[in-house]
Image: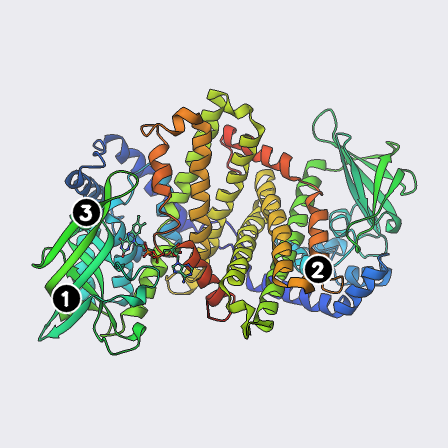
């Protein structure tokens, strides 16, 4: 056990810190959350800067420890969030890096890294959410192409995406998990209709995607035909294992701000609230240590996070909601009900954390069955 | 950076588990429940195996290991429900003669700012060290003969840990000990014991859930039971992350984090384990209650809930994240 980073890791951290301090002050103003083209341009612009500075591919070219340092330092410095690049950088990209052919890597990874292309995730369907293997979107082979018909839902950032990591059923006769394939679908192909859905937080973040005879080259399939479930598990392990890491740093910063705000407005005198904030401090500190432990395991597993990611995701999503409930208490009744207050939007968006990327109930099943070895069943 | 035990540390853990299985197995545990006086022969055996001298330099006859190693060993002791003033043994080896080898038994009590002082195994200690807060905030330590303090009997909730309330004691023989360090390390080692107990109760719950059948299937296939077990594991993983990290820095804030989360893991896991065991869990014969009672006892030792949370809240204002 040790907490010391290797000298080259510390060098990486120091270089990154210096670059962030130099670069962040002259970033353009952040766009309005409702301005999708603006958000796309902003997020891609930030990725381009990272790329020019040599940090573009850090999410899959670097060791898990370096990835961790990158997420920690960018968040600590208040750098822009991955935003629209979330899927491309944090799970489609790593999946293609781990499972794609050399050609596929050469085609899709550089534009993600350079900030040229945005990806979205087309896994969920109206009748296949938690039970992802129930998906019905069909892909029928026609020569060198698949013809895809069906519907996806809750597709984040679909409006502005260039590519979609798409799960399709290629063999309807096979058992549920065996007939699925993982495709990269260009979002400008004919037959795709995107209908944005408003979230409870206000702006549209995700969309319904209707697929009507969309032609996708067979060469766009990552992994073998009908072997998409296995590839999907790789994607999901990235999504649960590493994708939220930077946000823990952000939550710890928010917690400190909450305490100072409570002190300024007098709510700090309430010992119940104080103790609640103290306990959240313990939780977020331990979550960070848990991430550090998981990194060691990921390193041993060739960079792919294991089921330990579910342990992290489950607790993190709960604690993040508790954080913003505490924020509401700090703001006081009128503040907590004022949609323009600084923590209100975050409180609303945190409601999705126990649902997206697999609900808490599903994570508990995974932990009980895959880690603790309890029997399958209902 | 790697928060997982090294190969040497895993070997130390495995060796400790093997030693404890051999000298304090289930039968021995149940005997101790009926006769909780400290087993001096066992204590000497533990001493001979180096359990108390872990961190003494080799030149002084110790094992020469560090706090992270001690934490791993204490995690095993917590798993095994090993009774006795273990924390005192580990912290006073090299301070009180004979403690390192297990020949003599020392007690360590926190008298704080005059709050309630509980002394574990009062009838078994040859020496007693009392820590007190001083005017300089660093605290003072007093060495007392065990028959000097005035005691009130307490019928201990934990059948394995006799207790007495220390109502007054002469402030004799002041010792120059690093009191804040003793307090930090005592809290950390107590957290390690809690962690071991929490990890053990998940195993017990899972073992039971995989064996016991109701409605024609194993109860572990019921989602309600699965989800109890999953939450238990999460508490262990959170506590373990905090305890291991705190053992590396040994700073006060990380230790408070570790104690708070390990207390919660030990207590709530024991309760959930009891639930998974059904009626069997409520019996004297099942070991579940022993874990819960010991966990309750340790919650009251060294860093308790309210004060610990206040300290963590205070740290948010000063911006100290304890790293
Ligand atoms: C903000 C947000 C963004 C998202 N982005 C994307 C995206 O980009 N791409 C994408 O593909 N998907 C996305 N999703 C979808 C997300 O993965 C699903 O919402 C999630 O997996 C749950 O599926 P569902 O909504 O169909 O709910 P259901 O599966 O219908 O679940 C409803 C309730 O039933 C419970 N439940 C279901 N099955 C079980 C079971 N076996 N045991 C116990 N309880 C059960 C659930 O826990 C939940 O409480 C997003 C979701 C959100 C909220």
Of residues A374 and B163, the one drawn nearer to the viewer in this rendering: A374
Would you say B123 lies left or right of A63 here? right
Identity of the residue drawn at 61% across and 38% down? B252
Kindly report the distance in space between the C-alpha atoms of the residues bearing marks 1 and 2: 58 Å
Residue most extreme to the top: A265
Residue A364 drawn at (x, y percent): 46, 59
Tell me which chain the residue with mark 2 is part of.
B
Residues at marks 2 and 3 on the same chain: no
Question: Vertical placement of B211 versus A2: above or below?
Answer: below
> Which class describes the residues within 10 Å of circle 3: few (<14), some (14-19), or many (20+)?
many
Quadrant occupied by the N terminus of chain A: bottom right
Tag 3 residue: A196
Label 1 sits on a secondary structure element that is: strand
Kindly report the distance in space between the C-alpha atoms of the residues bearing marks 3 and 1: 20 Å
Residue B168 drawn at (x, y percent): 87, 33
Question: Vertical placement of A270 versus B144: above or below?
Answer: above
Identity of the residue drawn at 41% across and 61% down? A299
Residue most extreme to the right: B147
Identity of the residue drawn at 81% across and 52% down? B99
Q: Do the CB atoms of the residues marked 1 and 2 lie less than 8 Å apart?
A: no
**Foreground disc of the pair 1, 2:** 2
Residue A45 drawn at (x, y percent): 19, 41
For residue B307, say whether it is visible. Answer: yes
Tell me which chain the residue with mark 1 is part of.
A
Tag 2 residue: B282
Label 3 sits on a secondary structure element that is: strand
Of residues A175 and A38, the one drawn nearer to the viewer in this rendering: A175
Would you say A128 lies left or right of B50 here? left
Tag 1 residue: A148
Tell me which chain the residue with mark 3 is part of.
A
Would you say B153 lies left or right of A293 here? right
């Amino acid at each position: 056990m040790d907490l010391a980073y290797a000298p080259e890791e510390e060098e990486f951290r120091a270089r990154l810190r210096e670059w962030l301090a130099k670069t962040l002050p002259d970033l353009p103003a952040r766009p309005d959350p409702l301005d999708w083209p603006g958000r796309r341009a902003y997020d891609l612009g930030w990725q381009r800067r990272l790329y020019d500075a040599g940090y573009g591919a850090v999410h899959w070219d670097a060791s898990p420890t370096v990835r961790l340092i990158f997420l920690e330092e960018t968040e600590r410095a208040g750098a822009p969030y991955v935003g629209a690049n979330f899927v491309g950088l944090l799970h489609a990209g790593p999946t293609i890096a781990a499972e794609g052919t050399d050609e596929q890597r050469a085609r899709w990874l550089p534009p993600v890294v350079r900030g040229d292309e945005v990806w979205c995730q087309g896994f969920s369907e109206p009748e296949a959410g938690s039970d992802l293997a129930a998906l019905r979107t069909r892909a029928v082979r026609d020569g060198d192409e698949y013809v895809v018909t069906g519907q996806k839902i809750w597709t984040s950032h679909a409006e502005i995406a260039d590519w979609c990591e798409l799960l399709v059923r290629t063999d309807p006769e096979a058992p549920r998990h065996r007939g699925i394939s993982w495709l990269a679908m260009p979002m400008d192909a004919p037959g795709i209709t995107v209908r944005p859905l408003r979230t409870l937080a206000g702006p549209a973040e995700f969309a319904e995607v209707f697929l009507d005879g969309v032609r996708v080259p067979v060469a766009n399939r990552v992994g073998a035909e009908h072997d998409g479930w296995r590839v999907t598990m790789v994607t999901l392990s990235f999504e649960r294992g590493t994708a939220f890491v930077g946000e823990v740093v952000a939550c710890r910063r928010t917690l400190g701000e909450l305490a100072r705000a409570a002190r300024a407005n007098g709510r700090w005198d309430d010992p119940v609230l104080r103790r609640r904030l103290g306990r959240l401090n313990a939780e977020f500190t331990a979550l960070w240590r848990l991430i550090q432990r998981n990194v060691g395991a990921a390193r041993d597993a060739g960079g792919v996070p294991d089921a330990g990611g579910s342990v992290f995701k489950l607790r993190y999503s709960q604690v993040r909601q508790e954080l913003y409930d505490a924020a509401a208490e700090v703001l006081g009744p009128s503040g907590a009900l004022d949609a323009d207050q600084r923590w209100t939007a975050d409180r609303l968006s945190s409601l999705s954390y126990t649902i997206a990327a697999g609900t808490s109930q599903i994570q508990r099943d995974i932990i009980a069955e895959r880690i603790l070895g309890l029997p399958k069943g209902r | 950076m790697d928060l997982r035990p090294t190969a040497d540390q895993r070997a130390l853990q495995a060796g400790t588990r093997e030693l404890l299985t051999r000298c304090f197995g289930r039968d021995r545990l149940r005997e101790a429940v009926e006769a909780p006086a400290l087993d001096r022969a066992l204590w000497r055996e533990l001493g001979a195996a180096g359990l108390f001298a872990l961190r003494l330099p080799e030149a002084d006859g110790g094992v020469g290991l560090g706090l992270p190693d001690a934490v791993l060993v204490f995690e095993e002791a917590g798993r095994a429900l090993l009774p006795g003033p273990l924390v005192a043994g580990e912290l006073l080896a090299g301070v009180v003669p004979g403690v390192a080898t297990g020949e003599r038994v020392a007690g360590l009590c926190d008298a704080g700012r005059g709050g309630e002082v509980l002394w574990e195994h009062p009838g078994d200690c040859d020496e007693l060290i009392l820590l007190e807060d001083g005017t300089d905030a660093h605290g003072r330590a007093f060495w007392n003969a065990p028959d000097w303090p005035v005691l009130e009997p307490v019928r201990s909730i934990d059948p394995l840990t006799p207790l007495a309330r220390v109502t007054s004691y002469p402030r004799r023989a002041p010792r120059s000990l690093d009191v804040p360090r003793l307090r930090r390390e005592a809290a950390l080692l107590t957290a390690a014991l809690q962690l071991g107990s929490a990890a053990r109760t998940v195993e017990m719950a899972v073992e039971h859930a995989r064996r016991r059948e109701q409605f024609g299937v194993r109860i572990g296939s019921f989602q309600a039971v699965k989800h109890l077990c999953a939450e238990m594991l999460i508490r262990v993983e959170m506590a373990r992350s905090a305890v291991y990290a705190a053992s590396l820095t040994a700073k006060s804030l990380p230790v408070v984090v570790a104690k708070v989360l390990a207390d919660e893991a030990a207590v709530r896991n024991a309760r959930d384990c009891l639930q998974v065991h059904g009626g069997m869990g409520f019996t004297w014969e099942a070991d579940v209650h022993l874990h819960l009672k010991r966990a309750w006892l340790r919650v009251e030792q060294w860093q308790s809930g309210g004060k610990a949370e206040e300290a963590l809240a205070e740290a948010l204002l000063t911006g100290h994240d304890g790293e």
